[in-house]
Image (tube, helix red, strand yellow):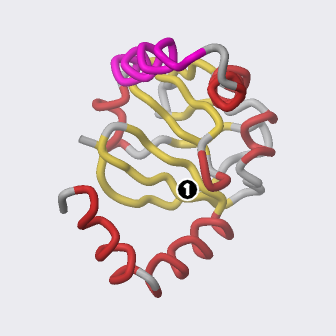
Amino acid sequence: MLLGEYKHNIDAKGRLIIPSKFRDDLGEHFIVTRGLDGCLFGYPMEEWHTLEAKLKQLPLAKKESRAFTRFLYSAATECSLDKQGRINLPNTLINHASIEKSCFIIGVSDRIEIWSEEKWTEFSSDANESFEEIAEEMIDFGF
């Protein structure tokens, strides 16, 4: 299970250190793609295959299904860890997440999320202010 929050810098070549606590769960090769809320999603291969199976079940006739599938697949890239535990992110993904230098890598159960420091700070602040309201809404989902 992927848990925690870590701050790292991306270098000028797009290389980003993946926290050592995430490396075993992600595996040597994993998929990074556009995420929601302006971040990037990183999936271990097994989780990516599970997501792929779900995406294949979406109705092709629905415009939203096609758009969502395109959104995820068009920017998806297979990443491999180098000897220093880094991955190389393409500019498409760096630009999507507005990452300039400092970023946060967080564990979210079955995936990681990569956020620019500015977006993560803003999101965290907003979520912290409304956490109790969000928790009340989760009752509808059985929490």
Dot 1 falls on a residue whose secondary structure is: strand
User: Residue placed at 49% from the left, 25% from the top?
Assistant: 81
At 43% from the left and 54% from the top, the residue drawn is 106
Residue 54, position as x, y percentages in the image? 43, 20
Q: Quadrant of residue 45?
A: top left
List the residue tagged with mark 1.
Answer: 8
Q: Quadrant of the C terminus?
A: bottom left
The secondary structure making up most of the magenta span is helix
| Quarter that holds the N terminus | top left
- Is residue 98 or residue 56 the one in the foreground? 56
The image shows residue 74 at horizontal and vertical percentages of 72, 21
Report the magenta residues as a range. 45-59
Q: Is residue 34 above or below residue 66?
A: below
Amino acid marked by disc 1: His
Q: Residues within 10 Å of mark 1 (few under 14, many from 20)?
A: some
Task: Name the residue: 57% across, 30% down.
Answer: 32
- Residue 60's x, y, as percent? 63, 14
Q: Indicate yes or no whether the magenta region holds residue 40.
A: no
Does residue 9 appear left or right of residue 130 in this picture? right
Q: Please give left or right for residue 110 compared with residue 9 in the image.
A: left
Q: Is residue 55 above or below residue 18?
A: above
For residue 79, above or below residue 136: above
121 to the left or right of 99: left
Question: Could you tell whether 2 is left or right of 57 in the image?
Answer: left
Residue at screen point 53% across, 42% down: 17
Q: Position of residue 94 (x, y in %)?
A: 74, 43
